Image (spheres, rainbow, N blue to C red):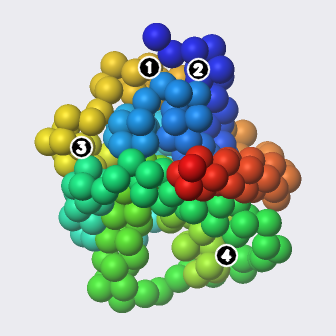
Amino acid sequence: MPTVSLLVIAVAVGLLIGSVGVGGVLLAPALVALGVMSAHQATATSTWAFLFTGVVGTVAYARARTIAWGTLARLVLGVVPGAFLGARVNALLSGALVLGLLGLLTLLVGAYQLVPRSASGREVTLRTPVWVVIGAVVGFGSALTGTGGPVLLVPLLLALDVAPLAAVALSQAVQLPVVAAASLGYAQAGLTDVRLGSVLGVLAAAGTLVGALCAPRLNADRLCQLVAVACVGVGLFLLVRAAF
C-alpha cells in the first residue's frame, strides 16, 4: 500500500507537470527515497504513472489549442524507438548506476531552472531530422530515468526560444508515446508495478488537470524556482545514496 506521503507527492508532481512541465522528475526519486522500491522498479513504475498525466495533460492543452501537432509528429518518430531502447538499457544497468543517473538528471534539471532566461516565443523552424534526433534523446533519457518526457523536453524547447506555455503544452502530449514505448520495454523486463503506478498516475493526473487549468494565471517563474530548489536537493540526496 502506498503511504500518505507518496500519495501527496503524486498529486504535487501532477500539479507541477500540468503547470510548468518539470514535476515528473520527482516521482521516481520519491519511490526510492521512501523505500517503496528499487531504482529499476521506480523508473519503470513512474513511467507507467505518466500514462495518466499524459492523457489528461494532452486533452487539457489540446482544448486550449496550444499543442503544435506538426512538431509533435516529428518528435514521435524519434521518441518511440528512443524510449523503448532507454527502458531496455535501464534493465541492464546496475541499481546504483540507475540511481546515480536519476540523481544527476534531477540535479541538472534543478540547476537549469535556476539560471535566468527569457523566451521570445518565436516560431521555431527546424528540419524534420533535427526534431527526430531531439525526440530520440528525450525518449531515451526519459525512459532510462522514469521521468516521462516533459522534464527533458521543456528545457530543450526553452533553449530553442519556444514560449514557455507552448513548450509545456507540447511536453504534455509527448508523454503518451514515451510511456507506450518505454512500458513495452519495461514489461519485457518485468519491472513495472502496474497497480501502484495506476494509483499514483490517477492522483498525478488529477493534479495535472488542475495545474494545466491554472497555468495561464500562475507565476511560472516562481514555480520553476521552487521546483528547481527541490530538484537540486533531491538530486544531491540520490547521488550520495548511489555512492554509498
Q: CA distance from mark 2 to mark 3?
A: 23 Å
Q: Is residue 210 left or right of residue 224?
A: left
Residue nearest the observer in this picture, 114 or 211: 114
Q: Are marks 2 and 1 in contact (CB under 8 Å)?
A: yes
Give the labeled residue for mark 3: 186
- Residue pictured at 39% horizontal, 48% vertical: 95
- Left or right: where 57 falls relative to 193: right
Q: Secondary structure at mark 1?
A: helix
Q: Residue 34 in the image: state x and y as whole percent.
A: 58, 28
Q: Residue 44: where, in percent of width, then height?
A: 34, 40
Q: Nearer the viewer, residue 179 or 108?
A: 108
* Residue identifier under label 1: 199
**Residue drawn at (27%, 36%), measured in percent from left and top?**
191
Image x and y of residue 179, in percent? 32, 46
Does residue 34 sit above or below 183 in this rendering?
Answer: above
Residue kind at label 4, given as amino acid type? Gly
Sequence-wise, the earlier of marks 2 and 3 is: 2
Assign a secondary structure to mark 2. Answer: helix
Task: Identify which residue is drawn at 79% across, 73% down.
Answer: 115
Asked if disc 4 and disc 3 are in contact, CB closer than 8 Å, the reply is: no
Label 4, secondary structure: give it: loop
